Every structure is written in C-alpha cells, then in structure tokens.
Image: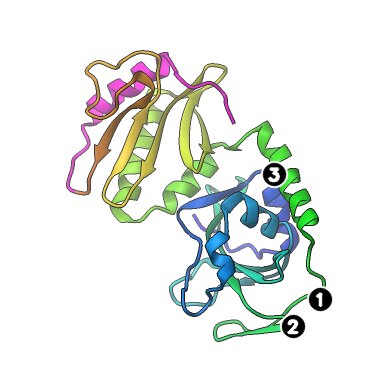
Amino acid sequence: MSVSTPLTVQRVSELVMANQAIRAPYYQSAHDEGVRFTDLDRGLQWGADVIPALMGLFRVEQDTRDDHPDGWVGFARHWRGATLWLDFDLFSESEESDSILVVTAISGLDGKKTIVDEDFGEIELPTQVPTQEEWGVRQKQYQAVRRKDDADGSAAVMAYIAALPGWKRDVATQFDEIIQREVSDVRRAVKYHQPFYGVEDQGWFASFSAFSKHVKLSFVCETHLEPEPPSGTAPERQALDLKETDMMDEEQVASWVRQAAENPGMGWLI
C-alpha cells in the first residue's frame, strides 16, 4: 500500500540510512528524454548517483502529475553542477510497518540558479554544490549500512512486488504466497535489485526477476531438484520462466520450494 505521510528531506535520508530504499523493477535513468535530458543522464548510476542524491536532497514535493497519483519527486545538486530529479514512491506493508522508499526514475536538469518546470514551477537551486569527495563520503556511509544487511524484511519485497505491472505482479504475488505457505519462517530481502527468500542461518533458496515478456522464478540449492525445472544448467541456477499466457503449476512450484529450502545454495552474501 502506498502511504500519504508527508515526506521530508530528512525522512528520505533516514530511510536510506536505515537501508529502507530499493530500486523499482523498472527503474529508469532518464524518464523524459528531450525535456529533462542532459549529458549527465548517460552516466547516472543507481549506487553512485541515486544514493548520494537521496542523502543530499534540498527539496521534496508530492507529485501532482496525473500519472503519478501517489508519488513524490526530489531534487539534489550533483557534484558535476547539474541538478538531479528523482521520482519515488513511499510504500508500507501495513500501518504499523516501516516505510520503504521505492525509487522509480532519475534524470538530470540543466540550470545554474533556477529551473522552471511546467509541473512544479520555479525551482530555486542552492548555491553550494557538493564536491566529488563529499559525494563519495555519502556513498561510503550508505555502503557501511548496506554491508550489515540488504533491504531486509517482507516490507521491502512487498514494495517490489507492488511496483510490478499487471500480470507480472500477479505471478510474483502467487510465488510469494507459495513460499510463505511452504516455509513459514522464511526470511525475505531485496538483494541485487531483486527479491530473495532464505532460511535463517542457512542461506537463500529462491528469488524472482521480471523481464519484458516473462517472470523468472529461480531456485538456488546445492543439488538438482526433482524433477528438474526447465531452465538452468546448474543446481544454483534452476528456474521456471512464466509468460503472461502461462498458468503456474502451484503444486509443482511448492515442491521445488520445499526441496530448495531444505538445501539452500547461496550463503548470506551482500
């Protein structure tokens, strides 16, 4: 569920430093080419640019655009001098759970003192631009937090699933529900920009990822599953690819989940 709690610059930084920020499945590095596109866009990166920007926002606004009813936008100065525009949603699994910041897009804007945008009006820019060294310090601060754990817990995975479109969200939800049913004490986390499922103190045993025409359900274990899934060439890379027109065999997937959970094939690596 998206939440309408007012979002502040300080709150964004707190979420990042709590490792409660993830990249949306279809995150974009330049969301409006020809309008908000600069040379900087070609080199923008998730870790190197988005995280330091989120920790250095100077302005956050609720998104008033018709196609972003629950979103937010933030503005930060890049060390190269340009201004970064970031789109994000704030997701919470329930009213009691922690919020997850889901970043959906980033792009660069030209401007030295002010930027005039048709949706948000005049954006005054701070005169102080961070140095490359200061940018690097922010990145290292986040990495120190991230090394302790990835975006952990079911809220991060639920936020990822909620950001998927249509039928892909349905497949991911079905897979998640099967895992919860078969492995009641499952541990969830978003690692390497995709959801992972694990057994505490043993390792990760499953994950999924969404592509343009299919959703890949992956099983990570030490031995081949019985029967072997149709995709993958090794125990740690066994998978099932589902297209929009495919029906999931829940009984078979549940069996693979149980087998993989009994013998996880990926340790607690960050």
For label 1, the crowd category at 10 Å Cα-Cα, with few meaning under 14, some 14 to 19 and many 20 or more, is: few
Q: Secondary structure at mark 1?
A: loop
Is residue 269 found inside the magenta-colored segment of the image? yes
Residue 63 image-quadrant placement: bottom right
Residue receiving disc 1: 127
Residue 269 image offset from top left, x and y in percent: 57, 26
Q: Is residue 210 above or below residue 233?
A: below
* Tag 1 near tag 3, CB within 8 Å: no
Mark 1 vs mark 3: give the one in front.
Answer: 1
Residue drawn at (24%, 41%) of the image: 242
Q: Residue at x 70, y 84 (%)?
A: 114
Which residue is rendered at x = 49% and y = 49% of the image?
159
The residue that label 3 is drawn on is: 18
User: In the shown orientation, is residue 270 left or right of residue 260?
Assistant: right
> Is there CB contact under 8 Å for labels 1 and 2?
yes
Look at the numbered disc 2 and give the secondary structure of its residue. loop
What residue lies at 25% left-to-right and 15% top-to-bottom? 226
Report the amino acid beneath label 1.
Thr
Q: Is residue 194 visible?
A: yes
- Spot occupied by residue 216 in the image (x, y as percentages of width and height): 32, 38
Residue 107 in sight in this render: no
Q: Of the residues under marks 1 and 2, which one precedes in the sequence?
A: 2
Q: CA distance from mark 1 to mark 3?
A: 29 Å
Q: Residue 113 has which mark?
A: 2
Going from the N terminus, do you reach mark 2 or mark 3 first? 3
Task: Give the amino acid at mark 2.
Answer: Lys
Q: Residue furthest right?
A: 128
- Percent from the top left, x then y, of residue 20? 62, 46
Residue in the foreground of this view, choosing between 106 and 15 = 106
